[in-house]
Image (cartoon, helix red, strand yellow):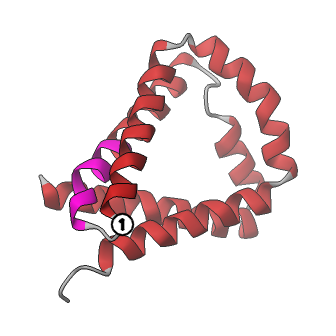
Amino acid sequence: MQITAGIITCIFSLVLIALLFVVLTKKELAISFLTSFASTAKAHYLEQSIRLIAGASILIYSENMLFSKIFNLFGWIFMTTSVILMLTPWKWHQSFGKVAMPLVIKNLILYAIAAAVLGMIILYCVIAPLKL
């Protein structure tokens, strides 16, 4: 279970890093990807399920990471917000997205840089304690 959680945590961090490269090379693809969140009930529940899996993986693997207490809390927050969003009607999430997405798109580079930095921090905190 620990190994699987570590692998999923690494994949999650790599996705966050990859977002920056997609924004820099194929901005329209990144915008299309980001605006697809909560566009349908299926997309809403898929997004929240993936967030729940990522949060659970971070939570499970946090004891093996640098700053384990911070990542334990991060995992719980990520999972809790995902469950809350799953219990929220997807139309509400879609309405919020219609307000928030123009701000994200306007600041897309900054958003992508922040996501990549978070991804690099997570990846470092997974890899650093390993005896390679």
Whole-percent x, y for residue 57 in the image = 28, 49
Which residue is the extreme one toward the front?
69
| Relative to 59, residue 15 above or below | below
* Residue name at image x 31 percent, y 61 percent: 68
Is residue 77 highlighted in magenta? no
- Horizontal and vertical percent for residue 131? 17, 86
63 is within the stretch colored magenta: yes
Looking at the rendering, the stretch of residues picked out in magenta corresponds to 55-64
> Three-letter amino acid code at disc 1?
Phe
Left or right of 69: which side holds 99? right
**Badge count:** 1
Q: Nearer the viewer, residue 62 or 70?
A: 70
Residue 101 against residue 119 in the figure, above or below = above
* Residue, far left: 1
Residue under circle 1? 67
In the image: residue 6, left or right of residue 82: left
Residue at image position (72%, 56%) is 111
Residue 49: quadrant of the picture: top left
User: In this rendering, would 89 be left or right of 4?
Assistant: right
Image quadrant holding the C terminus, namely bottom left
> In terms of secondary structure, what is the magenta stretch mainly?
helix
Q: Residue at x 37, y 72 (%)?
A: 125
As helix, strand or loop, the secondary structure at mark 1 comes to loop
Q: Residues within 10 Å of mark 1 (few under 14, many from 20)?
A: few
Q: Position of residue 124 (x, y in %)?
A: 40, 76
Question: Which residue is found at the position 45% from the left and 62% from the top?
Answer: 13
Residue 75 location, x and y as percent? 37, 46
